[in-house]
Amino acid sequence: MRCDAGARNGATMTAVDSPPTMNTLTETLARATLGGGAFPPKARAPDFPLVTSFYLDRAPDDAALETFARALASFPELRCRATAANAKSEKTLRRLRWERVDDGGWLKRVKRVEVGTVEELMTVTNEATLTPLDAAAPLWDCVVVTRKKGDEAWDGDNEGFPEPPVVLLRVSHAIGDGIALVNVLKKISTALDGGEMRLLDFKRRARAARSFLALLWACVTFIFVCVYGFFKAVLTAAGPYDTKTVFKGSRPPYAFSGARRVVVCPPVSMADVKAVKNASGCTVNDIVVAALAGAIQKYLARVGDPSATKKPRVRAATPYAFPDRVRGALTNNWTFVSLSLPMGVMSASERLRRAQKTCNLMKRSPEPYVTRALNEVVAAAGPSVQRQVVFDYMSRHSMVFTNVPGPTEPIVFMGSRVRDIVFACSNLVNQVSALSYAGRLRLTLVVDPGATPEADFIGRAFVEEIHALRESAAA
């Protein structure tokens, strides 16, 4: 998958009310909504929506929902459906465009559900990640979940599911990537004081002065990184598969099983994560990757997987967001990179050092840019070839992993304070997502329950790994 830079970087408006244009990656994702998914038919995988669950103080009434729908309508992509760009593309879907849709109103895309138990809420959430959006309408809808009347205490906190009311907002990935969708969240929510939603301000660290020998060595290593990154980008889709562990949520012939379970893990304090960050010089992403690898290592040992005593190959297909994007517009400007997790028996601090080394190598590698160029070639070969290449790439990995920084303070959504935010998305392989909100960071896993049983343990082990790193940093 890929995206274009510059003027083709995203949703370029030609007139005030004209539908935006699609870049190549957006076409790929939109094609999945029309063609039954991003993978070949043999994969039996539907088009999976992005599902963000907003747990509120009170359920929204129709007036709040209408205000919300009107705010969404300010984004042209959220008023459109994907369609063939011309008659020649009607069957092949080779070229697509956005088309403005008058679907009779926002109410058609709102569903209200009552649940009495956490099991019922889990069922609703699981179904939300598996049910494709209506391709004939704008590519979003939402499910408003409230509790049935009764005096029973809510038992969902032990399962990671806070008490309803909750709004499950479902959006097609064709609308935009994670960074671009933050623009949507900023438009449809506010801070508690009514101001703009607050996010982390990312700044690159200033580079320290280096000696001549250090610069010479940096040049040599950069050449190596470039060569390695090039061949990695070229060969991953045709290379070896990950080790067959219990965590790898897909088995030969790598077809979608049709079953997925959303696992909401216990939250960790961002204060603990930042304490580790400040003590180690690592990034938050380094820490999350290390803790996730440690949690999976513990999980493999718990379920008696033979690879737990070895060093299994466990990789994540990880979205890489390109910096050359149009600001303030919905766009898809990213590609996948292959991230190897530091597996094997080792201390939490050693695992963090290895995670940092791997992530630093990725940051210096041209892999994402080579992948973007390669996907341009693949896209030119046609949708069938593109689906097969995406399938070959994805099935070799154990998971898709995303780490998205959310609002740093509580927000107001649909007229109510948001208590918690949970993100989930199904995929051909297991999906692991990390999302921070209001001082807490939470993992969400979407797994095949038949292939990856007892996945709740991974969330508890992730918290243990963060605590072990915090103790090591304090020592």
Image (cartoon, rainbow, N blue to C red):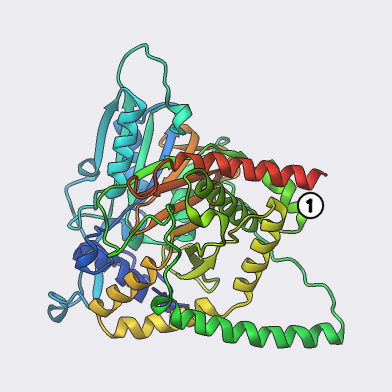
Q: Is residue 408 left or right of residue 451?
A: right
Q: Where is residue 231 drawn, in percent x and y?
A: 51, 84
Q: Residue at x 49, y 59 (%)?
A: 179
Residue 11 seen in the current view: no
Q: Where is residue 210 drawn, in percent x and y?
A: 84, 79
Q: Residue at x 67, y 84 (%)?
A: 222
Label 1 packing within 10 angstroms: few (<14), some (14-19), many (20+): few
Q: Nearer the viewer, residue 455 or 137?
A: 455
Q: Is residue 85 left or right of residue 370?
A: left
Classify the position of the C terminus by image quarter.
top right
The quadrant where residue 56 appears: top left
Classify the position of the N terminus by image quarter.
bottom left
Q: Which residue is mark 1?
A: 279
Q: Residue at x 55, y 71 (%)?
A: 323
Mark 1: secondary structure:
helix
Q: Is residue 433 left or right of residue 17?
A: right
Q: Residue at x 52, y 84 (%)?
A: 230
Q: Where is residue 199 drawn, in percent x and y?
A: 59, 50
Q: Nearer the viewer, residue 25 or 21?
A: 25
Depicted 322 relative to depicted 116: above or below: below
Q: Nearer the viewer, residue 424 or 314?
A: 314
Amino acid under disc 1: Ala
Q: Which residue, as the protein is rendered here, is positioned at the far top? A: 151
The quadrant where residue 415 appears: top left
Q: Where is residue 25 drawn, in percent x and y?
A: 36, 72
Q: How many marks?
A: 1
